[in-house]
Amino acid sequence: MMSMAWKLFYNAFIVPLMWCFFQAAGFFNKKIRRGIEGRQGLVGKVRERIDSAPARHRLWFHSSSLGEFEQAKPIIAAIKRLRPDISIVATFFSPSGYEHSQSYKLADIISYLPFDSERQVNDFVDVIRPAAVIMVRYDVWPNLTWALRERKIPIMIANATMKKDSPRKILFLRQFHRALYDSFSSILTVSDSDKASFADFHLTKPVIETIGDTRFDQVKIRRDDAAKKQILPNKITRGKRIFIVGQSWEADDSVVIPVLFKIQKRMPNLLTIIVPHEPTVEHLEQVEYHLEGKTSFIRFSAMNQYAGEKVILVDSVGILVPLYKYGHVAYVGGSFRQGVHNVLEPAAFSLPVIYGPRHTNSQEAVALAEQGGGFVVGDEKDLYRTLRTLLDNEADRKESGKKARQLVEENLGATDRFLKYLLPLLPPR
């Protein structure tokens, strides 16, 4: 009864407000506009894909964006190995996740998630007819959840997280989310603190257990694959100290680049590789403007003309992880903006990892700093002092890198633990 009341409230008030917001925001934000355009005729597009590749059983993974989908990949790979008869559907909320995953070969269908209206969601679910649904981390949509529950389709959350002081626990939002989460079969959390935080909702139906984070498994897979790739020739990296700046934004550049110039004066064999989070024309040109006249640089796409430049500016996507294997120290961006990006990737390669003050969005970044594999810097002075120490002192650098890799190794195995809950839900072969 309570769940029905929340459903009526959500569809009468929240859904129309969200619809108006996205339509208005689409006029000003290209990313949102791409998402709106990509959802046009969505059910028809998916129906065509399903009709052209019919399958007896489908497993549906939903991720908000590309980062969350990375957490689904080790589970998908394991399912494809154990149950090759299962067809995989992968959906995304964000355009970046959808667009950058088109080449992923283990998913049979890749699609946007429809707007969360009753009609669109019900049509979408009826077309896919999944055996089970796995939502990755946090992107839970009410009408989708209720539609799946009404059809008695099992729903799980993988890598679930919940802060103790989450806004979802405030007043009436607590009751709303309690009704929502009680529709799930399993909520499998990253940590015991996340499990305890979900317990605050006093849920009656789902199994809530700690299994760890599948990101550690995926990072190991990517590290092992990257070890086989030769992105840079030995003649370029031989005898160099290599500093990798990964997933940087303008706010990171404003701190890192001035420090870079100072370090270069002391260390002529330093090679810096800058990998922007979004290598747009505007961002690349902005970085080059700051470098112009102060150091030598070259774009990665022109590496066949490399002549000893001290900075390589990466102007493509998908090669950051293979580049980490050449590094000695890494800086991970986002941490002077809204939140640090993936610190596990460089850690898996035994690199000391540096990041800025906005890192508490990442439990791994906090753990790395506590363990001695990560270093938090607050400004240019902090970064200069930390980077210089790590580059100058080989013993300290290797010890920090060892601790960083150890964090990854100690947290492997979440995928296998997740499968113990998923496999019994799947239909027989």
Image (cartoon, rainbow, N blue to C red):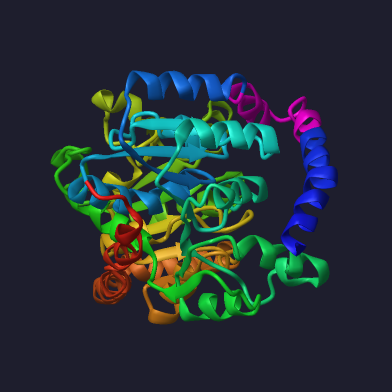
- Residue 67 drawn above or below residue 291: below
Find out whether residue 36 is within the magenta segment. Answer: yes
* Predominant SS of the magenta segment: helix
Q: Count the marks.
A: 0
Find out whether residue 129 is within the magenta segment. Answer: no
Residue 413: percent from the left, percent from the top? 27, 68
Between residues 91 and 221, which one lies in front from this camera angle? 91
Q: Is residue 416 visible?
A: yes
Q: Is 70 displayed left or right of 379 in the figure?
A: left
Q: Residue 40 appears in which quarter of the rendering?
A: top right
Q: Is 389 displayed left or right of 204 in the figure?
A: left
Between residues 298 and 366, which one lies in front from this camera angle? 366
Between residues 286 and 153, which one lies in front from this camera angle? 153
Q: Is 241 displayed left or right of 13 in the figure?
A: left
Q: Residue 308 appears in which quarter of the rendering?
A: top left
- Residue 191 drawn above or below residue 318: below
- Residue 377 drawn above or below residue 235: below
Q: Is residue 278 visible?
A: no
Which residue appears at 58% of the width and 33% of the height? 286
Residue 144: percent from the left, percent from the top? 60, 45
- Residue 231 drawn above or below residue 52: below
The magenta span reads 22-39
Residue 112: percent from the left, percent from the top? 53, 32
Which residue appears at 48% of the width and 54% of the height? 136
Give the position of the N terminus as an image quadrant: bottom right
Residue 119: percent from the left, percent from the top? 68, 33
